[in-house]
Image (cartoon, grey):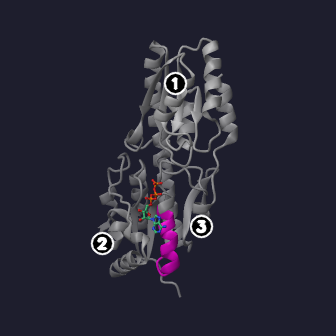
């Protein structure tokens, strides 16, 4: 018979994302409400292997909902990718008598959770999507995405002010190695001329054609958003390639970089993180195992780790079409 759940562990892993603290807070307070004991694991899977666990009570998560980063720290653990590392993690969890884990992170974190659960089904996991990339299947939002886009749009607004004062073309690089969600939303919210995505919906030649059209219409400045994972290169390389073919504007490059990860989480990220943390505990207590909790069409859903990791969530072609029309 399956052991009833009395002691759970929670950790954050992979890249940090604003809103992770709100999720930790929701997990701890919901678990306390149901009389569960909660342990925080420092530094993700690396801390799990090292047995770096400590008790967390409701008061320990006071005054963190508005803070960026993660109070539990995060890490990328190569050791957890090995069977020996996962065995050490299992033994550490057993030493603390942990019945279940809640993992907050991106696709790598969920991949690790899936493999661990196959090897050690005695300790079930629930995953919470925490990554600024919004690239996980099975949820409309991941924690941190909204804040990252808000930061990028604010940067675009500021750059527009200076671009407007000169005849300038700005290439602004945003995060997104494999997925163009941040780039597309930033382009729409920032009113950009064009967006270059890892999904390769627009290439340099087409971009130059579009810029020429804008120049003919006497557009005084332009902003183009480049996802870091764009096939033909990041913003620096794109600027170089465009410069070879187009000289109407003075070309400038801005890479927003890690600014997108920091800062106080947006209202939406706090809400999403609270809902996901709360639901993760409730689903665990209802007997759900080895799934990622998500929000689809404003409803809480559960998606198997397998599907969350392997199925792709394509950027919305309708939004791309709209962005093009609105930029004309
Ligand atoms: P982000 O989307 O912000 O990068 P992530 O969760 O995808 O977050 P990763 O560094 O890819 O970040 O993964 C986090 C951790 O998950 C890794 O450092 C590793 O410990 C574990 N992990 C990733 N892939 C595997 C795997 N194939 N087997 C076991 N563990 C893994």
Please determine whether, in this image, residue 68 is positioned above or below residue 244: below
Q: Earlier in the sequence, mark 3 or mark 1?
A: 1
Q: Is residue 245 left or right of residue 98?
A: right
Find disc 2 in the rendering and name its residue: 50
Indicate yes or no whether the magenta region holds residue 108: no
Residue interval drawn in magenta: 109-123
Q: Is residue 302 visible?
A: no
Q: Earlier in the sequence, mark 2 or mark 1?
A: 2
Q: Is residue 139 above or below residue 164?
A: below
The quarter of the image holding the C terminus is: top right
Q: Judge by depth and name the residue closer to the eye, 325 or 21.
A: 325
Distance of label 3 from label 2 (alpha carbons) = 27 Å
Residue 218 spot, x, y in % from top left: 60, 11
- The residue at 34%/61% (across/down) is 58
State whether label 2 is within 8 Å of ligand 1: no
Q: Nearer the viewer, residue 244 or 215?
A: 244
């Amino acid at each position: 018979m399956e052991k009833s759940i009395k002691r759970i562990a929670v950790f954050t892993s992979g890249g940090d994302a604003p809103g992770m603290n709100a999720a930790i807070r929701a997990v701890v307070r919901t678990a306390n409400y149901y009389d569960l004991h909660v342990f925080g694991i420092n530094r993700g899977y690396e801390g799990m292997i090292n047995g770096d666990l400590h008790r967390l009570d409701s008061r320990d998560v006071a005054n963190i909902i508005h803070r960026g980063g993660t109070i539990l720290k995060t890490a990328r653990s190569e050791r957890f990718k090995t069977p020996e590392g996962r065995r050490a993690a299992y033994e550490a969890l057993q030493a603390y008598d942990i019945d279940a884990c809640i993992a907050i992170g991106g696709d790598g974190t969920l991949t690790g959770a899936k493999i661990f659960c196959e090897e050690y089904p005695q300790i079930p996991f629930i995953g919470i999507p925490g990554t600024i990339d919004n690239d996980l299947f099975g949820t409309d939002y991941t924690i941190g995405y909204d804040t990252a886009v808000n930061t990028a749009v604010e940067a675009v607004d500021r750059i527009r002010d200076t671009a407007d004062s000169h005849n300038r073309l700005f290439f602004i690089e945003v995060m997104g190695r494999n997925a163009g969600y941040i780039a597309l939303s930033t382009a729409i919210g920032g009113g950009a001329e064009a967006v270059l995505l890892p999904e390769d919906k627009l290439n340099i030649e087409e971009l130059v054609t579009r810029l020429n059209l804008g120049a003919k219409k006497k557009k005084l400045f332009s902003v183009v958003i480049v996802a870091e994972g764009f096939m033909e290169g990041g913003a620096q390389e794109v600027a170089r390639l465009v410069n070879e073919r187009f000289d109407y504007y003075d070309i400038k490059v801005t890479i927003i970089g890690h600014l997108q990860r920091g800062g106080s989480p947006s209202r939406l990220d706090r809400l999403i993180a609270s809902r996901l943390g709360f639901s993760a505990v409730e689903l665990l207590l209802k007997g759900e195992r080895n799934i990622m909790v998500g929000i689809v069409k404003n409803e809480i859903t559960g998606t198997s780790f397998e599907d969350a990791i392997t199925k792709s969530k394509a950027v919305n072609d309708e939004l791309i079409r709209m962005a093009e029309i609105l930029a004309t």
